[in-house]
Amino acid sequence: MNQSAPASFVYDPPVDPYLQVLHRDEELLVVDKPSGLLSVPGKAAEHSDCLESRAQAAWPEARIVHRLDMDTSGVMVLAMNPAAHRHLGLQFERRKTRKSYIAEVWGLMSADEGEVDLPLICDWPNRPKQMVSFEHGKPALTRWQVLERRERTTRVRLLPHTGRSHQLRVHMLSLGHPIIGDRFYAQGEALTASKRLALHAERLELHHPANGERVAFEADCPF
């Protein structure tokens, strides 16, 4: 996945805390990724600082299994050995994991819950942006629930069934409610309403590679 950004963008990842560990054992390293930090290194040398390199500084065996967009914060799991990496990779591939996100979107959503079932594809001339394409897109499904309506925004819980790039961002945009602070898809007041992308991976549920037991990890929403 191309994680580049607009030309005006300067990569300045947060360093405090440098690495926030939620759980560690012989199979798993679970961390709370801050907004503004890449999951894996970018192509440019100045984009080398990332969650993977920070984890490997402490535990060289740690390996990325999945990614969060640079602007998204929240729960990420890394594998601590090759067997765990295979086990976790298959879970993500076969959609055996369950993910829950908190977002704040622009405008007041009228319904209390719903779903967006719109196929997505890379908007190639404008990459890394994604777009809806019924002809060429890959299936993408997001369920959503309203948590709170505020003065000009709505706080929602997002439950993605698929894990397409920028899925939650484009699906909320398709409803006319872009996620606030989204430098790719929000404009005007929706963009300036938050200094960061108001999207946080609050919970990740999976089968533990050691015994197959269902476990869940959570990180408090910072906005």
Image (tube, rainbow, N blue to C red):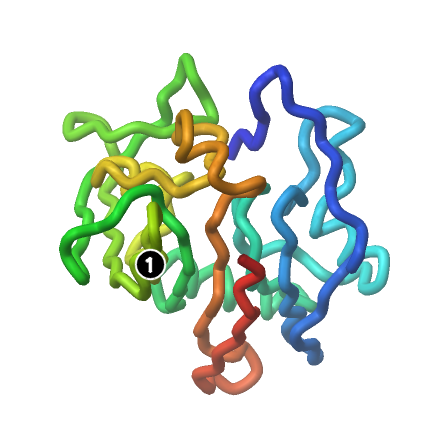
Give percent across and percent down for residue 35: 61, 48
Displayed quadrant of residue 81 = bottom right
Q: Is residue 107 left or right of residue 128?
A: left
Give percent across and percent down for residue 160: 32, 56
Nearer to the camera, 195 or 86: 195
Q: Is disc 1 surrounded by few (<14), some (14 to 19) or many (20+) residues within 10 Å?
A: many
Nearer to the camera, 108 or 34: 108
Q: Which residue is drawn at 71% across and 51% down?
A: 52
Q: Residue at x 52, y 79 (%)?
A: 208
Q: In this view, does 89 lie to the left or right of 18?
A: left
Give percent across and percent down for residue 214: 44, 83
Answer above or below: position of 212 versus 14: below
Q: Which residue is drawn at 78% across and 53% down?
A: 54
**Residue at the top extreme of this rendering:** 125
Q: In this view, does 13 lie to the left or right of 113?
A: right
Answer above or below: position of 113 versus 212: above
Task: Kindly state the secondary structure of the residue where label 1 is placed.
Answer: strand
Q: In which quarter of the image is the C terminus?
A: bottom right
What count of labels does the image hold? 1
Give percent across and percent down for residue 153: 35, 48
**Residue at the right extreme of this rendering:** 57
**Residue at the front extreme of this rendering:** 151
**Residue that label 1 marks:** 156
What amino acid type should be assigned to the residue bearing mark 1? Val
Nearer to the camera, 137 or 172: 172
Answer above or below: position of 8 versus 46: above
